[in-house]
Amino acid sequence: MADEKAPEVKFPDPVEMSKAMTRIAEQSQRLVSEFLARQAKEPGTASPDPLNIGGAFLEMTARMMADPVKLMQAQVSLWQDYLTLWQRTTQRFLGQDAAPVIAPSKEDRRFKDSAWDENTLFDFIKQSYLLSARYLQTSVREVEGLDDKTKNKVDFYTRQFVDAMAPSNFVLTNPEVLRMTLESGGENLVKGLEHLLDDLERGKGQLSIKMTDYEAFQVGKNVAVTPGKVVYQNDLMQLIQYTPTTGQVARRPLLIMPPWINKFYILDLREKNSFIKWAVDQGNTVFVISWVNPDENLAAKDFGDYMIEGPLAALDAIEKATGEREINVVGYCIGGTLLSCTLAYMAAKGDDRVASATFLTAMTDFAEAGELSVFIDEEQLSALEERMEDKGYLDANAMATTFNMLRANDLIWSFVVNNYLLGKDPFPFDLLYWNSDSTRMPAAMHSFYLRNMYQKNLLVQPGGITLKGVPIDLRTIKTPAFLLSTKEDHIAPWKSTYAATQIFSGPVKFVLSASGHIAGVVNPPAAGKYCHWVNAKLPKSPEQWLEGAKQAPGSWWPEWGKWLQRHAGGKVPARVPGEGGLPALEDAPGSYVASRVV
């Protein structure tokens, strides 16, 4: 430690500091005035605990205190760990080597600065935090007698608390921030305060953390640039037909139905990782639904409207554009859930236009719905519906916050440190630009979706839900299906998505990709990343499926491409957008996707 070079201390320029603080004071005064004005216009008696977190923790505490012996054992174990840490820290202060009592996981980027290991004091702070975090989370998880929903909620919000209290999130306990503060004379903290106020101003009083440089990207310019034309549109969507890159194409067009919880161009970020361009290059006539970003005028649009004006309208339009009645369809996330509903609806109507169906990380059985289930109970849904009733939609920021909380260290606290404590500008990153490009949810649709699927799990029950007068029975789906799930998915857990293999009546192929909900899906072959598992057999248990599966290197895209070729229906000359039965309305990616809520 004696050899460590002390950072050069810079004293702040009093004139520049005075100017900065004047700007901050003026901006703060304006923000407070605007906040108070909004509060005056929006009187209400909102519940102080709309998430019902207090009730869950109260029950957990009662259960924990009912077994004092177990609680005492956990506290004694923590105390012993602390004593060991004190002993080994003392050894390090005396110049001796000492193995750590606990270490962060390799994936934990909060402690990547070398000072967390090399400086004995900060190593002690780090290990103290990790021991306390482990104690809290283990104690909560081992409480007996809680129902699954309460247990999951307590575990989730304990993790939120533990993440928030990490020493990396505070000036005096983060060595990188302290070093920057000394070297810059505190300019980083002043700059960080300005960033904080800018984010509050952009969020109109709510913190809207800037994750990337929004000016560095523009839809249609450097993201979502695969050439094509919008050939159809209605209130809910625009239909894009992409320009072919091969002389011949599959006879059956390919329709991709992305989720409307976010924008479609996650499948078309850049040329090198665009699933859409790859599908075009494989010789497909690719159509993509680009959902509208709804406002209060679409508040009454329900799940059935999304089916009628989404995939069913697209099938009609594609037949007009190409003259082809049979279509291969891909549904991603909630787009896949809607695809399953649509296929059951079509089966009831005797409509066999869908030749094959691909489901990407799509839920049909919501019994084990992953971490999103912590937001689903009567108290939270009632509070959410009350908010939506006022505006006619769920605000985009609410959706974004929910998903960001699932990965708080990566999508919240890392930016708190970078933007506010280090005073740095966020790095230009196309994926985070897309992640920030949030969408609203119409009140009627979102309430139906959350209550009937997440809360009551009615979709999996024959006739459990009815869309446009037709009871939906997923067992009637005989369409050949390709199911892709991802092993680390926290939004659509793969063991839950696997349930569809036991529900659908037609031939099913199930493939499991490594990584998560986005990276596992958007994994181009050229990247040579991750792996995937295949197994022709479909046992009842997902665990049994994985035990018998064969691991294959790299992307799942080629595996899907071979499967899709079997449903291509032969070859025809390439189709140019706008030259068929539907004229081109505008260039891809269209105007609906350009509606940005920031």
Image (cartoon, rainbow, N blue to C red):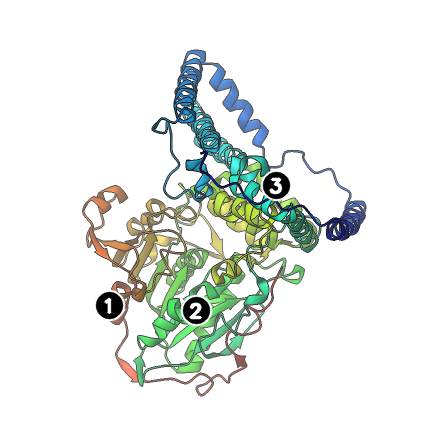
Question: Quarter-wise, where is residue 540 in the image?
Answer: top left
Q: Is residue 389 above or below residue 93?
A: below
Labelled pair 3, 2 in contact (Cβ < 8 Å): no
Residue type marked 3:
Ser
* Residue that mark 1 sits on: 562
> Of the residues tagged 1 and 2, which is closer to the observer?
2
Question: Quarter-wise, where is residue 287 in the image?
Answer: bottom left
Point 24% across, 68% down: residue: 562
Q: Is residue 164 left or right of residue 508?
A: right
Dot 3 or dot 2: first in sequence order is 2
What whole-number distance in Å separates the C-alpha atoms at marks 1 and 2?
Answer: 24 Å
> Of the residues tagged 3 and 2, which is closer to the observer?
2
Name the residue nearer the viewer: 422 or 199. Answer: 422
Dot 1 or dot 2: first in sequence order is 2
Mark 1, secondary structure of its residue? helix
How many C-alpha atoms fall within 10 Å of the one at disc 2: few (<14), some, or many (≥20)?
some
Mark 2, secondary structure of its residue? loop
- The image shows residue 109 at horizontal and vertical percentages of 44, 44
* Residue that mark 2 sits on: 270
Name the residue nearer the viewer: 450 or 425. Answer: 425
- The image shows residue 41 at horizontal and vertical percentages of 80, 48
